[in-house]
Amino acid sequence: MQTLVVDHPLVTHKLTVLRDETTEAPTFRRLTDELVTLLAYEATREVPVRPVTIRTPVADAVLRAGIGMLDGMARLLPTAEVGFVGLARDEESLVASTYANRLPADLSGRAVFVLDPMLATGGTLETVFGMLIERGAGAVTGVSLLAAPEGLARLESAFPGAGPVPVRVVTAALDERLNERGFIVPGLGDAGDRLFGEI
């Protein structure tokens, strides 16, 4: 599996403000959107293209696990199809369970992007990547604001480099570790709560 940590001053600046606990939800949402657009630019660098004679761009499928990240990705791929997988993590066991699945049944040969704000334990992305590969995806790229080494190690183990489908992760930063609650350190807190308010 390939991991790309995007090293760019704009990415670093936006991530610094996201990490600040005093950043309010509207600013957090706007910066998440802007950061995902920058990450999407890098994530799509190797998307295969073919010559066409029309002026309208043609895009592969974009799948979302991070609703707050969708606008940033769709800005670069406005004609892309969008699927949805909803997973909820049990805060004690740290195991995610699927509560919604709106994926196309057949993704044969398609490049697919999965948006997940935080690659922490890797369980969510491992589950979704597996679902996509079962549906025939030709390549799978996870796009995350932050990643933890433990989550990357889990994905590398589940999807080794010699696997049948290329798998990679694009992230703004690789943080130090997970804490005992499965949160990324230093991280930026619970991205869902910061995007949409605490439940």
Image (tube, rainbow, N blue to C red):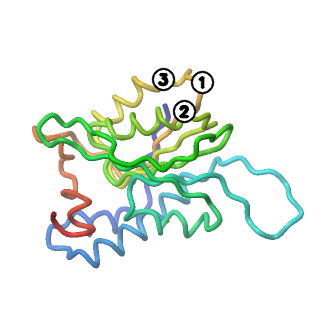
Q: Nearer the viewer, mark 1 or mark 2?
A: 2
Q: Quadrant of the C terminus?
A: bottom left
Find residue 183 and report its horizontal and vertical position in percent: 18, 46
Residues tagged 1 and 3 counted as in contact (Cβ below 8 A): no
Spatial CA span between label 1 and label 2: 9 Å
Q: Which residue is mark 2?
A: 133
Q: Nearer the viewer, mark 1 or mark 3?
A: 1
Q: Which residue is mark 3?
A: 160
Find residue 34 and report its horizontal and vertical position in percent: 43, 70
Spatial CA span between label 1 and label 3: 9 Å
In depth, the one of 154 and 124 nearer the eye is 124
Tell which circle, 3 or 2, labels the residue nearer the N-terminal end: 2
Q: Secondary structure at mark 3?
A: loop
In depth, the one of 115 and 134 nearer the eye is 134
Q: Secondary structure at mark 1?
A: loop
Find residue 83 and report its horizontal and vertical position in percent: 51, 53
The three-letter code of the residue at mark 1 reads: Pro
Q: Which residue is mark 1?
A: 164
Residue at 38% over, 57% down: 66
Q: Nearer the viewer, mark 3 or mark 2?
A: 2
Compared across the picture, whether 30 is left or right of 39 comes to left
Is the residue marked by circle 1 packed among few (<14), some (14-19), or many (20+) residues within 10 Å? few
Query: Which residue, as the protein is rendered here, is positioned at the far right?
Result: 53
Residue at 49% over, 31% down: 1
Q: Is residue 14 above or below residue 151?
A: below
Marking on residue 138: none
